[in-house]
Amino acid sequence: MTRLARVLIDPDALRHNLQRARAAAPGRRLLAVVKAGGYGHGMVAAARALAGADGFGVATVGEGLALREAGLSAPVLVLEGPAGPAEVEAAAAAGLAVVLHHEAQLRWLEEARPPRPVPVWVKLDTGMHRLGFDPAMAPALAQRLAACAAAAPPPAWMTHFANADDRDDPLTTEQIRRFAAAVDGLPGARSLANSAGVLGWPGSHGDWVRPGIMLYGASPFAGATGPELELRPAMTFTSRLIAVHRRRRGEALGYGGEYVCPEDMPVGVVAAGYGDGYPRHAAAGTPVLVGGRRVSLVGRVSMDMITVDLRAHPEARVGDPVVLWGEGLPVEEVARHAGTIAYELLCHAGARPASREVLGPECT
């Protein structure tokens, strides 16, 4: 039998969010980021629904090859670049573009003899301090790539923001300035903006924008939710009540007995737990929708089940539908109660086999 906990994916919501990104960055080319299994939505399904994008961003060459094997012919950029010399050849054979962020990758490209030139994006470290070349190296990198037979000229230039989720943080403005100074006068497209850049930093839009989390309906900004930004949740994590009990005052619920009933009260059991991707560290009080009404998580999250306080919904019955996040309950709100971010919850959802379902056609 099918597991009651299900992750429902709405392709129409993905398409709506894509148009929201286009409206926020008019005239720019758009790279839809579908790495990490499409942020938990299914990489191929997400890419098909986002077919109106100008290209796709993935983390690895393997993810790019999976898109090609699924029949997707749009431009694909490997954001972490090649992991070794063989991946330069594999990327070239599949027509993938690669990011170069390290000297070793540049050497692999210079030593390669691929069947066709590889489109290259060069990542500059303007303040994230994770990956990327020193911005002062940009002119020398441009010269080396112009002399590299394996690189398709000219390279595109990119950077990544560290604090763009905070619209009051001055580092983003400084990163934009550093990037502009580094690539001034160099040929090639520019790309700076992630989802936060698309929505909050119009001066960062460049030639290509690279939205990720916003395409899936979640906010890139701390303290905001997707619906507040005119985004629609593409994932709804659902299940059902499988038991309703009347518990007595003083009775402890679940492993560890962390929650003790303050009075006689109805308690529901939902068929979903950390084995399905629900956050184990979600705190008591985390909202859950039962039959469209808000109730609160109580007790410790188990592998397969959670318990909820039904005092706010005493009419609830076994079989009632439950929304853990998604339509009607922003994932960001659940993430705050779990001490994490929406990205993590979306990526972990639907961990059980066959638990993800795409609603309607994936593309029009």
Image (cartoon, rainbow, N blue to C red):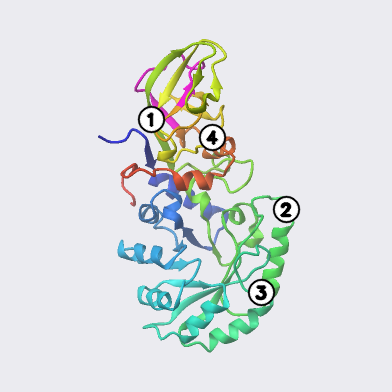
- Residue 171 image point, x, y percent: 72, 59
Say which amino acid is labelled 1: Ala
Residue 97 seen in this snapshot: yes
SS of the residue at dot 2?
A: loop
Mark 1: give few (<14), some (14-19) or many (20+) Cα within 10 Å: many
Mark 3: give few (<14), some (14-19) or many (20+) Cα within 10 Å: some
Question: Comparing marks 4 and 3, which lies closer to the viewer?
Answer: 4
Question: Comparing marks 3 and 1, which lies closer to the viewer?
Answer: 1
Q: Give how far apart the Cα atoms at labels 3 and 1 are.
A: 50 Å
- In the image, 196 versus 28, the foreground residue is 196
- Residue 53 image point, x, y percent: 44, 59
Say which amino acid is labelled 3: Asp
Q: Give how far apart the Cα atoms at labels 3 and 2 are.
A: 22 Å
Residue that carries the numbered disc 4 in the rendered image: 282
Span shown in magenta: 307-323
Q: Is residue 187 magenta?
A: no
Residue that carries the numbered disc 1 in the rendered image: 271
Name above or below for residue 357 compared with residue 32. above
Q: Is residue 310 magenta?
A: yes
Name above or below for residue 314 compared with residue 46. above
Residue that carries the numbered disc 3 in the rendered image: 134
Res 236 → quadrant:
top left
SS of the residue at dot 4?
A: loop
